[in-house]
Image (cartoon, rainbow, N blue to C red):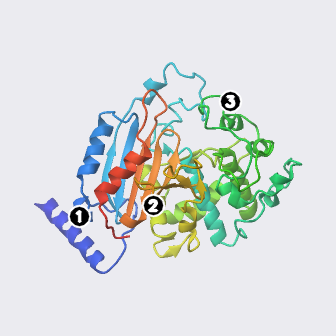
């Protein structure tokens, strides 16, 4: 009886706050609700949950959905990653993607690797630096912040701007898509094995004029990290703590460091899933957190516009913004959602028009394919219906 009274009291308090137009914000934890209470149909989520639980979509280990600022759905799916590691590469370490001490969880905690989701966080830091007046704009030449490094005589390298780095149109020759990340021939794997990641990227030849061609390139995110370090006079990991994590209430994280001390900005950040959802909620609220503007007005929209075709000539694949993937609807006619995406199945999906944030984590690098972003997007959009309360 007592528990029913508590639930009724909380429901009444939430209803009163909604009537006053007050926006809910997570404190130590997210305020909880049910799909139905937030105007959602739970059936598509339950269907997806069943498929994930029975392993139909590989090694997904977490699913979390926030609607209207309330955590409405959360499930976890344990996998024996230590057993899956057996028989794989025996060399242990942070860049052996089979090492169960490092992937997908950080040393048996609930901190989950974001892999390339780290790129989106790095982009957020660029926005914060703009808001704080520490960067003059996106069309500044990157070389301005790369003094002391060996640079190319090719004049095209000197024309690379921060905007080119953010959109992966720097024109640098790079290949991390035709071979696996576990293959030493992968450009990213070669960078991760080098003593100075920034210098490794700058040593690569130019292949195109900056701004002309999208080439997925984790190395350019490391250049962004160096630009941030020079512009803010602070290590980007420490900058993130002070200006992003603390304001959002994120107290626990781990960020790998490169041999020169920079954070592994392209793939080394670990967060707990509910804290990753806070980043999505920050974007859902145009870069404002509890009344405080962390990002410049318009930065979220600018970051999540479909600026670059990732597959020229085909309209329906995701496009690219400022280190965020921009997702089309099923017909490829509109781009109602955007996504942070990382190797192995890390997904943070934000659907602004439906006040929706969804997080999926996993480690699909073994024998089974993971769920496509299209499947995940369609299920969460079907559950949310046409309307939300941002």
- Do the CB atoms of the residues marked 2 and 1 lie less than 8 Å apart? no
Whichever of callouts 3 and 2 sits on the residue coming sooner in the sequence is: 3
Give the crowd class for mark 3: few <14, some 14-19, many >=20 residues within 10 Å: some
Mark 2 = which residue? Answer: 334
- Horizontal arrangement in the rendering, residue 321 relative to residue 9 (left or right): right
Query: Residue 37 — which label?
Result: 1
Whether residue 254 is situated above or below residue 60 in the rendered picture:
below
**Residue found farthest to the bottom:** 20
Query: Residue 220 — which label?
Result: none
Q: Residue at x 59, y 49 (%)?
A: 312
Whichever of callouts 1 and 3 sits on the residue coming sooner in the sequence is: 1
- Mark 1 lies on a secondary structure that is helix
**Residue found farthest to the front:** 313
Mark 3 = which residue? Answer: 185
Give the crowd class for mark 1: few <14, some 14-19, many >=20 residues within 10 Å: few
Q: Residue at x 27, y 40 (%)?
A: 50
Location of residue 313 in the rendering, given as x and y in whole percent from the top left corner: 57, 49
Q: Is residue 116 visible?
A: yes
Whether residue 116 is situated above or below residue 322 in the rendered picture:
above
Choose between 109 and 158: the one closer to the eye.
158
- Res 210 → quadrant: bottom right
- Mark 2 lies on a secondary structure that is loop
- Res 76 → quadrant: top left
Q: CA distance from mark 2 to mark 1?
A: 28 Å
Q: Residue at x 41, y 47 (%)?
A: 374
Q: Residue at x 24, y 73 (%)?
A: 15
- Can you tell which of label 1 and label 3 is closer to the viewer? 3
- Mark 3 lies on a secondary structure that is loop
Whichever of callouts 2 and 1 sits on the residue coming sooner in the sequence is: 1
Whether residue 141 is situated above or below residue 151 in the rendered picture:
below
């Amino acid at each position: 009886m007592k528990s029913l009274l508590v639930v009724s009291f909380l429901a009444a308090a939430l209803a009163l706050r909604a009537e006053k137009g007050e926006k809910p914000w997570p404190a130590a934890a997210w305020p909880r609700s049910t799909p139905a209470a937030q105007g959602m149909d739970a059936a598509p989520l339950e269907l997806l949950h069943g498929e994930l639980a029975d392993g139909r979509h590989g090694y997904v280990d977490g699913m979390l959905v926030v609607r209207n600022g309330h955590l409405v759905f959360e499930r976890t799916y344990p996998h024996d990653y230590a057993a899956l590691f057996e028989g794989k590469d025996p060399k242990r370490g942070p860049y052996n993607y089979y090492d169960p001490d490092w992937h997908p969880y950080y040393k048996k905690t609930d901190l989950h690797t974001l892999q390339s989701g780290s790129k989106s966080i790095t982009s957020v830091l660029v926005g914060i630096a703009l808001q704080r007046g520490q960067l003059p704009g996106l069309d500044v030449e990157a070389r301005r912040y790369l003094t002391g490094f060996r640079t190319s005589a090719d004049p095209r390298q000197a024309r690379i701007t921060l905007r080119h780095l953010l959109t992966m149109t720097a024109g640098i020759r790079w290949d991390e898509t035709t071979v696996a990340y576990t293959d030493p021939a992968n450009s990213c794997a070669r960078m991760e094995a080098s003593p100075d990641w920034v210098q490794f990227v700058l040593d690569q030849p130019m292949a195109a004029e900056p701004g002309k061609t999208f080439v997925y390139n984790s190395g350019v995110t490391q250049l962004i990290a160096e630009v941030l370090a020079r512009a803010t006079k602070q290590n980007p990991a420490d900058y993130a703590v002070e200006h992003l994590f603390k304001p959002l209430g994120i107290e626990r994280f781990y960020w790998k460091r490169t041999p020169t001390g920079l954070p592994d900005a392209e793939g080394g950040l670990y967060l707990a899933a509910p804290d990753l959802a806070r980043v999505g909620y920050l974007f859902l609220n145009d870069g404002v957190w509890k009344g405080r503007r962390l990002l410049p007005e318009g930065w979220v929209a600018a970051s999540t516009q479909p600026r670059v075709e990732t597959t020229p000539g085909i309209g329906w694949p995701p496009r690219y913004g400022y280190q965020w993937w921009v997702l089309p609807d099923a017909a490829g006619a509109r781009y109602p959602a955007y996504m942070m995406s990382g190797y192995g199945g890390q997904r943070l999906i934000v659907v602004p028009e439906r006040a929706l944030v969804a997080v999926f984590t996993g480690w699909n690098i073994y024998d089974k394919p993971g769920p496509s972003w299209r499947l995940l997007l369609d299920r969460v959009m079907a559950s949310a219906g046409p309307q939300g309360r941002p």
